[in-house]
């Protein structure tokens, strides 16, 4: 079993924290707000309990099979994210920013926040939650008007957050990203896509 599957409960609940949403774990399912999140293939019976207005979230390395399964249960696909993984020791953890840009880190109550500023104005931010041997990053965003600088800003934020994770003993970093962002990260040495995060609803 892959590490992302072994550590599913840990990273899924950390992801919930990064969304400022309460979560609970019961058996194979982590409930995040109105979402029932599970690894697929797994206990398919959960699909039958998905009510209108809630979502089934399947984390899988077989997106075609997972989609076919969900559709067979009367569910329709909505959005997709990508789970990426990297070992902290394989990443460049020294921020490299253009002139006039800098990072500011702020520990929040439940997670760490980093912002990148350009000419003293915040233009991007990201969140990190550190767990037992792992850390999860999400909400890594750069303002659209600075889209051409997004790759540089993203990697600088990862360097800042990754250094924090490494310092606290997290060997593995997970990132929940949108599809375009995931493609950018997959092209960076040390990162790899490990699973799709597929949402379905009735």
Image (cartoon, rainbow, N blue to C red):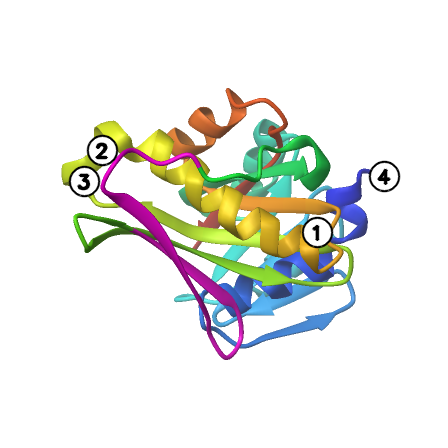
Q: Quadrant of residue 197?
A: top right
Where does label 3 land, which residue? 144
Q: CA distance from mark 2 to mark 1?
A: 40 Å
Asked whether residue 75 is in view, the answer is no
From the image, state whether disc 2 or disc 1 is nearer to you: 2
Placement of 123 over or under 15, stated as above or below: above
From the image, state whether disc 1 or disc 4 is nearer to you: 4
Where does label 2 land, which residue? 147
Answer whether labels 3 and 4 touch (C-beta < 8 Å).
Answer: no
Q: Quadrant of residue 31?
A: bottom right
Where does label 4 land, which residue? 1
Question: Per the image, is 13 magenta?
Answer: no
Q: The N terminus lies in which quarter of the figure?
A: top right
Answer whether labels 4 and 2 touch (C-beta < 8 Å).
Answer: no
Mark 1: secondary structure: helix
Placement of 35 over or under 93, stated as above or below: below
Answer whether labels 3 and 2 touch (C-beta < 8 Å).
Answer: yes
Q: CA distance from mark 1 to mark 3?
A: 39 Å
For the record, the magenta segment spans 96-116
Residue positioned 66% across, 36% down in the render = 86
Mark 4: secondary structure: loop
Q: CA distance from mark 4 to mark 2?
A: 37 Å
Which is more toward the observer, 142 or 119? 119
In this picture, residue 79 sits left or right of residue 73: left
User: Which badge, 4 or 2, comes first in the chain's sequence?
Assistant: 4
Using a 10 Å C-alpha cutoff, classify the residue at mark 4 as few (fewer than 14 neighbours), some (14 to 19) or many (20 or more). few
Residue positioned 64% across, 38% down in the render = 85
Using a 10 Å C-alpha cutoff, classify the residue at mark 1 as few (fewer than 14 neighbours), some (14 to 19) or many (20 or more). few
Residue positioned 52% across, 23% down in the render = 188
The location of residue 11, given as percent across then percent down, is 66, 57
Which is more toward the observer, 134 or 65? 134
């Amino acid at each position: 079993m892959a590490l992302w599957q072994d550590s599913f409960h840990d990273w899924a609940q950390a992801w919930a924290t990064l969304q400022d949403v309460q979560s609970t774990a019961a058996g194979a399912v982590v409930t995040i707000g109105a979402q029932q999140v599970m690894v697929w293939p797994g206990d398919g019976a959960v699909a039958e309990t998905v009510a209108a207005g809630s979502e089934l979230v399947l984390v899988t390395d077989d997106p075609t099979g997972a989609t076919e399964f969900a559709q067979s249960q009367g569910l329709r696909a909505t959005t997709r994210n990508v789970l990426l993984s990297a070992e902290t020791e394989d990443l460049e953890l020294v921020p490299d920013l253009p002139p006039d840009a800098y990072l500011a880190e702020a520990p929040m109550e439940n997670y760490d926040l980093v912002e990148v500023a350009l000419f003293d104005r915040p233009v991007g931010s990201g969140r990190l939650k550190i767990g037992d041997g792992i850390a999860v990053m999400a909400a890594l965003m750069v303002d659209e008007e600075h889209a051409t600088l997004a790759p540089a800003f993203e990697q600088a934020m990862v360097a800042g957050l990754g250094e924090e994770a490494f310092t606290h003993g997290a060997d593995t970093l997970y990132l929940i990203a949108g599809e375009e962002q995931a493609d950018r990260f997959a092209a960076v040495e040390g990162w790899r896509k490990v699973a799709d995060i597929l949402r379905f609803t009735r």
